[in-house]
Image (spheres, grey):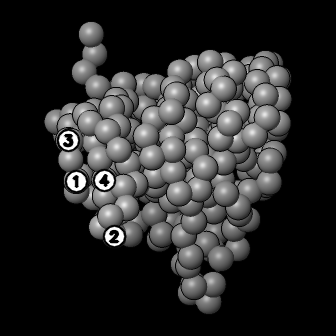
Amino acid sequence: MTTPLVRMERLSVRYGANTVLDHVDFAIEPGEIVTVVGPNGSGKSTLLRAVIGGITPSAGRVTRGAGLRIGYVPQKLVLDSTLPMTVGRFLSLPRRASDARTRDALDRAGVPGLQARQMAALSGGQFQRVLLARALLVQPDLLILDEATAGLDQPGAAAFYRRIEEVRSETGCAVLMVSHDLHVVMSASDRVICLNGHICCEGTPQVVAEAPVYRALFGEGTQGTLALYQHHHDHDHEAHSHKTPEDAH
């Protein structure tokens, strides 16, 4: 039996009188892709911060594997557009990365050869891929994405999640992500956690998409999510062998 990379036991987080997370039991196994979904204010970002170690639980505990390396891709990063900075320079802050490691990270992120490009000149999709490359530089055991496709259109988001699946296949890292792209993200997940201050339901995408509590949170229209999940899942695997230049989305 494998040892989880991260385990939460009866985790609760309170800010004053406000309980954000209540008695959460949760573990991430090596190599799995886990997606956390939930309405606004459901504690998704707090859960990620607890995994990373950015907050102290009010109750319960978080256990991380010894020497666990975490790569983090934020929802967005605002850079001064007048600041001249190449992609290569950005990837070497705050610690210098060798040219070989920079090239490898950009290749894995699906944007090879961008080292000399100015950060300010990148498209939204390219910018997020560079943030992904930055996270991959640490050779993470666990890759965390906090709504990393929030600014992308649907084809761009779908392409990004396909790349995440490929990164997992190539490196063996586990992935924990928060997303609002419900039907897109379903196709890239091994397990889905439905969160609303506590874990309402969890399981495979198909199990969660059919759960009454999931539909209650996201509306009856989400029952179409399952059909979209199956369509994207089938389509993505069919299209896997003949990729298109998606990086400019």
Q: Residues within 10 Å of mark 4 (few under 14, many from 20)?
A: many
Q: Which residue is mark 2?
A: 94
Mark 4 sits on what residue?
Answer: 13
How far apart in space, not on screen, are marks 3 and 2 (Cα)? 31 Å
Give whichever of 140, 24 is nearer the camera: 24
Q: Disc 3 marks which residue?
A: 61
Task: Say which label, 4 or 3, has the lower sequence index.
Answer: 4
Q: CA distance from mark 2 to mark 4?
A: 31 Å
Q: Amino acid at mark 3?
A: Arg
Q: Whole-Å distance between the Cαs marked 4 and 3?
A: 10 Å
Quadrant of res 227: top right
Side (left or right) of 65 relative to 85: left
User: Where 212 falls versus 182 (above or below)?
Assistant: above
Q: Are marks 1 and 4 in contact (CB under 8 Å)?
A: yes
SS at badge 1: loop
Along the viewing direction, whichever of 38 and 184 lies nearer the viewer? 38
Circle 4 sits in a helix, a strand or a loop, which is it? strand
Provide the residue designation for mark 1.
58
Disc nearer the start of the sequence (2/4): 4
